[in-house]
Image (cartoon, grey):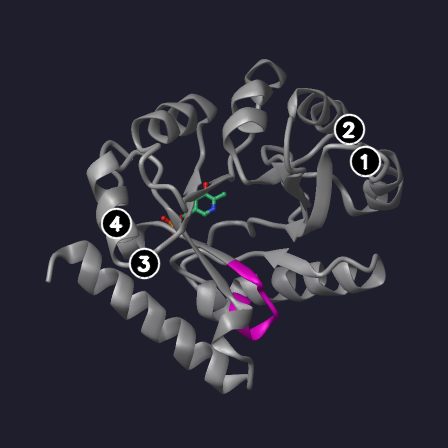
Amino acid sequence: MTDVASNLRAVQQRVAFACRRVDRPVESVRLLAVSKLHSANSIREAYGLGQRDFGENYAQELRDKATQLHELAEIRWHAIGPLQLNKAKYVAKMAYAFHALDRVALAEELSKRRAGLPLLCYLELNLGGELSKSGIQVSQLSAVLEQISPLPNLKLAGLMCLPPLSPDPESSRPFFRALRELALQHGLKELSMGSTHDFEVAIEEGATVIRVGSAIFGERPGA
Ligand SMILES: *Cc1c(COP(=O)(O)O)cnc(C)c1O
Protein backbone atom coordinates (compact mmCIF):
# COMPACT_ATOMS: atom_id res chain seq x y z
CA MET A 1 0.00 0.00 0.00
CA THR A 2 1.12 3.56 -0.61
CA ASP A 3 1.37 6.00 2.24
CA VAL A 4 -1.93 7.66 1.37
CA ALA A 5 -3.72 4.32 1.29
CA SER A 6 -2.36 3.10 4.60
CA ASN A 7 -2.71 6.52 6.23
CA LEU A 8 -6.31 6.85 5.11
CA ARG A 9 -7.13 3.40 6.39
CA ALA A 10 -5.46 4.14 9.74
CA VAL A 11 -7.46 7.38 10.11
CA GLN A 12 -10.70 5.59 9.24
CA GLN A 13 -9.93 3.03 11.90
CA ARG A 14 -9.23 5.68 14.51
CA VAL A 15 -12.51 7.38 13.58
CA ALA A 16 -14.34 4.08 14.04
CA PHE A 17 -12.72 3.49 17.42
CA ALA A 18 -13.55 6.98 18.64
CA CYS A 19 -17.15 6.53 17.50
CA ARG A 20 -17.42 3.24 19.31
CA ARG A 21 -16.12 4.77 22.54
CA VAL A 22 -18.99 7.22 22.64
CA ASP A 23 -21.58 5.01 21.02
CA ARG A 24 -21.94 6.96 17.81
CA PRO A 25 -22.56 5.40 14.40
CA VAL A 26 -19.48 5.80 12.24
CA GLU A 27 -21.62 7.31 9.46
CA SER A 28 -22.37 10.26 11.72
CA VAL A 29 -18.83 11.60 11.17
CA ARG A 30 -17.78 12.88 7.79
CA LEU A 31 -14.05 12.74 7.12
CA LEU A 32 -12.77 15.68 5.17
CA ALA A 33 -9.33 15.04 3.69
CA VAL A 34 -7.43 18.33 3.84
CA SER A 35 -5.32 18.36 0.69
CA LYS A 36 -3.97 21.93 0.77
CA LEU A 37 -0.47 22.17 -0.75
CA HIS A 38 -0.60 18.49 -1.73
CA SER A 39 -0.57 17.35 -5.31
CA ALA A 40 -3.52 16.56 -7.55
CA ASN A 41 -2.19 13.01 -7.73
CA SER A 42 -2.51 12.54 -3.98
CA ILE A 43 -6.12 13.64 -4.28
CA ARG A 44 -6.72 11.22 -7.16
CA GLU A 45 -5.30 8.44 -5.09
CA ALA A 46 -7.51 9.14 -2.09
CA TYR A 47 -10.51 9.49 -4.40
CA GLY A 48 -9.68 6.09 -5.87
CA LEU A 49 -9.90 4.69 -2.35
CA GLY A 50 -13.42 6.04 -1.95
CA GLN A 51 -12.68 9.40 -0.30
CA ARG A 52 -15.09 12.06 -1.62
CA ASP A 53 -14.73 15.14 0.61
CA PHE A 54 -11.60 17.26 0.27
CA GLY A 55 -10.63 20.46 2.07
CA GLU A 56 -8.59 23.31 0.62
CA ASN A 57 -7.46 26.50 2.35
CA TYR A 58 -6.62 28.80 -0.51
CA ALA A 59 -9.34 29.86 -2.94
CA GLN A 60 -7.13 29.90 -6.03
CA GLU A 61 -5.63 26.53 -5.22
CA LEU A 62 -9.14 25.14 -4.83
CA ARG A 63 -10.16 26.62 -8.17
CA ASP A 64 -7.09 25.22 -9.93
CA LYS A 65 -7.43 21.76 -8.45
CA ALA A 66 -11.17 21.58 -9.10
CA THR A 67 -10.50 22.49 -12.73
CA GLN A 68 -7.65 20.03 -13.05
CA LEU A 69 -9.60 17.21 -11.39
CA HIS A 70 -12.99 17.79 -12.98
CA GLU A 71 -13.09 14.15 -14.11
CA LEU A 72 -13.59 13.10 -10.47
CA ALA A 73 -17.33 13.49 -10.85
CA GLU A 74 -18.37 12.81 -7.24
CA ILE A 75 -15.77 14.93 -5.50
CA ARG A 76 -16.95 17.52 -2.97
CA TRP A 77 -14.69 20.51 -2.40
CA HIS A 78 -14.75 22.17 0.99
CA ALA A 79 -13.16 25.59 1.36
CA ILE A 80 -11.87 25.74 4.93
CA GLY A 81 -9.55 28.74 5.13
CA PRO A 82 -10.00 32.48 5.64
CA LEU A 83 -11.41 34.06 2.50
CA GLN A 84 -10.94 37.53 1.04
CA LEU A 85 -13.97 39.20 -0.49
CA ASN A 86 -12.38 39.41 -3.95
CA LYS A 87 -11.77 35.65 -3.99
CA ALA A 88 -15.25 34.67 -2.84
CA LYS A 89 -16.23 34.04 -6.46
CA TYR A 90 -13.95 31.00 -6.70
CA VAL A 91 -15.49 29.41 -3.65
CA ALA A 92 -19.01 30.31 -4.75
CA LYS A 93 -18.38 28.73 -8.12
CA MET A 94 -16.39 25.62 -7.18
CA ALA A 95 -17.13 24.58 -3.61
CA TYR A 96 -19.73 22.33 -2.10
CA ALA A 97 -19.20 23.81 1.36
CA PHE A 98 -17.44 26.71 3.08
CA HIS A 99 -16.24 26.24 6.66
CA ALA A 100 -14.78 29.62 7.55
CA LEU A 101 -17.68 32.03 7.24
CA ASP A 102 -16.77 34.85 9.62
CA ARG A 103 -18.58 37.99 8.52
CA VAL A 104 -21.83 39.15 7.00
CA ALA A 105 -20.28 40.97 4.04
CA LEU A 106 -18.61 37.75 2.95
CA ALA A 107 -21.86 35.81 3.28
CA GLU A 108 -23.59 38.40 1.10
CA GLU A 109 -20.90 38.19 -1.54
CA LEU A 110 -20.98 34.38 -1.59
CA SER A 111 -24.76 34.34 -1.89
CA LYS A 112 -24.65 36.88 -4.70
CA ARG A 113 -22.07 34.86 -6.65
CA ARG A 114 -23.58 31.42 -6.07
CA ALA A 115 -25.68 29.68 -8.71
CA GLY A 116 -27.29 26.25 -8.50
CA LEU A 117 -27.45 24.40 -5.20
CA PRO A 118 -27.01 26.57 -2.10
CA LEU A 119 -23.50 26.71 -0.68
CA LEU A 120 -23.35 24.80 2.59
CA CYS A 121 -21.84 27.12 5.20
CA TYR A 122 -20.32 26.76 8.64
CA LEU A 123 -19.96 29.85 10.80
CA GLU A 124 -16.49 30.00 12.26
CA LEU A 125 -16.35 31.01 15.90
CA ASN A 126 -13.35 32.49 17.62
CA LEU A 127 -13.66 30.73 20.96
CA GLY A 128 -10.09 31.21 22.10
CA GLY A 129 -10.43 34.98 22.06
CA GLU A 130 -7.21 35.10 20.05
CA LEU A 131 -6.88 38.44 18.31
CA SER A 132 -4.81 36.96 15.50
CA LYS A 133 -7.46 34.44 14.56
CA SER A 134 -10.49 34.77 12.39
CA GLY A 135 -13.96 33.80 13.49
CA ILE A 136 -16.84 35.70 14.99
CA GLN A 137 -17.14 36.35 18.71
CA VAL A 138 -19.76 34.42 20.63
CA SER A 139 -21.45 37.67 21.61
CA GLN A 140 -22.11 38.39 17.90
CA LEU A 141 -23.46 34.98 17.01
CA SER A 142 -27.19 35.68 17.27
CA ALA A 143 -26.95 38.92 15.32
CA VAL A 144 -24.85 37.36 12.56
CA LEU A 145 -27.19 34.38 12.26
CA GLU A 146 -30.12 36.72 11.87
CA GLN A 147 -28.44 38.56 9.01
CA ILE A 148 -27.17 35.48 7.23
CA SER A 149 -30.25 33.28 7.44
CA PRO A 150 -32.30 35.13 4.80
CA LEU A 151 -29.57 34.96 2.14
CA PRO A 152 -31.02 32.86 -0.70
CA ASN A 153 -28.02 30.93 -1.98
CA LEU A 154 -26.44 29.86 1.30
CA LYS A 155 -27.53 27.07 3.56
CA LEU A 156 -26.30 27.36 7.11
CA ALA A 157 -25.20 23.88 8.19
CA GLY A 158 -23.58 24.57 11.52
CA LEU A 159 -20.56 25.89 13.38
CA MET A 160 -16.81 25.51 12.98
CA CYS A 161 -13.85 26.19 15.24
CA LEU A 162 -10.09 25.87 15.27
CA PRO A 163 -8.92 25.75 18.89
CA PRO A 164 -5.60 27.38 19.85
CA LEU A 165 -2.67 25.16 18.94
CA SER A 166 -1.43 22.99 21.75
CA PRO A 167 0.59 19.79 21.91
CA ASP A 168 -2.07 18.23 24.12
CA PRO A 169 -5.27 17.21 22.25
CA GLU A 170 -7.21 17.33 25.52
CA SER A 171 -6.76 21.08 25.63
CA SER A 172 -9.14 21.31 22.63
CA ARG A 173 -11.96 19.60 24.50
CA PRO A 174 -13.44 22.65 26.25
CA PHE A 175 -13.56 24.49 22.90
CA PHE A 176 -15.29 21.60 21.16
CA ARG A 177 -17.74 21.32 24.02
CA ALA A 178 -18.48 25.03 23.91
CA LEU A 179 -19.09 24.84 20.16
CA ARG A 180 -21.53 21.98 20.61
CA GLU A 181 -23.41 23.93 23.28
CA LEU A 182 -23.68 26.96 21.01
CA ALA A 183 -24.93 24.88 18.09
CA LEU A 184 -27.53 23.30 20.33
CA GLN A 185 -28.70 26.69 21.61
CA HIS A 186 -29.15 27.94 18.07
CA GLY A 187 -30.69 24.83 16.57
CA LEU A 188 -27.73 24.07 14.29
CA LYS A 189 -26.93 20.45 13.57
CA GLU A 190 -23.42 20.27 12.16
CA LEU A 191 -20.09 20.72 13.94
CA SER A 192 -16.93 21.07 11.85
CA MET A 193 -14.16 20.50 14.38
CA GLY A 194 -11.02 18.47 14.94
CA SER A 195 -7.91 17.99 12.81
CA THR A 196 -4.96 15.58 12.84
CA HIS A 197 -3.92 16.11 16.42
CA ASP A 198 -7.34 16.30 18.08
CA PHE A 199 -9.99 14.68 15.87
CA GLU A 200 -10.70 11.85 18.28
CA VAL A 201 -11.48 14.33 21.05
CA ALA A 202 -13.68 16.20 18.56
CA ILE A 203 -15.61 13.04 17.74
CA GLU A 204 -16.14 12.38 21.43
CA GLU A 205 -17.55 15.90 21.72
CA GLY A 206 -19.96 15.54 18.80
CA ALA A 207 -18.07 16.55 15.64
CA THR A 208 -20.04 15.74 12.50
CA VAL A 209 -17.21 16.81 10.19
CA ILE A 210 -13.51 16.39 10.96
CA ARG A 211 -10.82 18.09 8.87
CA VAL A 212 -7.75 15.87 8.68
CA GLY A 213 -4.71 16.74 6.59
CA SER A 214 -1.26 15.53 7.65
CA ALA A 215 -2.45 12.20 9.08
CA ILE A 216 -3.63 11.33 5.55
CA PHE A 217 -1.25 13.10 3.18
CA GLY A 218 1.83 13.50 5.38
CA GLU A 219 3.67 16.71 6.13
CA ARG A 220 2.71 19.59 3.90
CA PRO A 221 5.40 20.57 1.42
CA GLY A 222 6.88 23.89 2.43
CA ALA A 223 4.74 24.09 5.55
C1 LIG B 1 -4.80 22.73 7.49
C2 LIG B 1 -6.09 22.73 8.22
C3 LIG B 1 -6.60 21.56 8.78
C4 LIG B 1 -5.86 20.24 8.76
O1 LIG B 1 -4.75 20.27 9.58
P1 LIG B 1 -3.89 18.96 9.90
O2 LIG B 1 -3.19 19.27 11.14
O3 LIG B 1 -2.97 18.77 8.73
O4 LIG B 1 -4.86 17.83 10.02
C5 LIG B 1 -7.84 21.62 9.39
N1 LIG B 1 -8.54 22.77 9.47
C6 LIG B 1 -8.09 23.92 8.94
C7 LIG B 1 -8.91 25.13 9.05
C8 LIG B 1 -6.84 23.93 8.31
O5 LIG B 1 -6.39 25.08 7.81
Q: Residue at x 83, y 57 (%)?
A: 186
Mark 2 and 1 residues: CB-CB less than 8 Å, in contact? yes
Q: Nearer the viewer, mark 1 or mark 4?
A: 1
Query: Which numbered disc covers residue 217?
Result: 4
Q: Is 220 left or right of 194, judged from the image as shown?
A: left
Q: Is 158 left or right of 55, judged from the image as shown?
A: right
Tally of numbered tags: 4
Please tell me which of labels 2 and 1 falls first in the chain.
2
Rendered view: 184 above or below 161: below
Report if residue 207 lies within the magenta region: yes
Q: Which residues are magenta?
A: 202-209
Report the front residue among 48 and 34: 48
Please tell me which of labels 4 and 3 falls first in the chain.
3
Mark 3 and 2 residues: CB-CB less than 8 Å, in contact? no
* Among the 4 quarters of the image, the one containing residue 103: top right
Badge 2 marks a residue whose secondary structure is helix
Question: Which image quadrant: the C terminus?
Answer: top left
Residue pointed to by mark 3:
50
Q: Does ligand 1 reach within 8 Å of label 1's beta carbon?
A: no
Question: Which image quadrant: the N terminus?
Answer: bottom left
Please tell me which of labels 3 and 2 falls first in the chain.
3
Rendered view: 65 above or below 72: above
Give the CA separation, mark 4 to mark 3. Answer: 15 Å
Q: Does ligand 1 reach within 8 Å of label 2's beta carbon?
A: no
Please tell me which of labels 1 and 4 falls first in the chain.
1
Please state the horizontal and vertical placement of residue 96, each as a whole percent of the image. 54, 40
Query: Which numbered disc covers residue 148?
Result: 1
Residue pointed to by mark 2:
104
Give the CA separation, mark 3 to mark 2. Answer: 35 Å
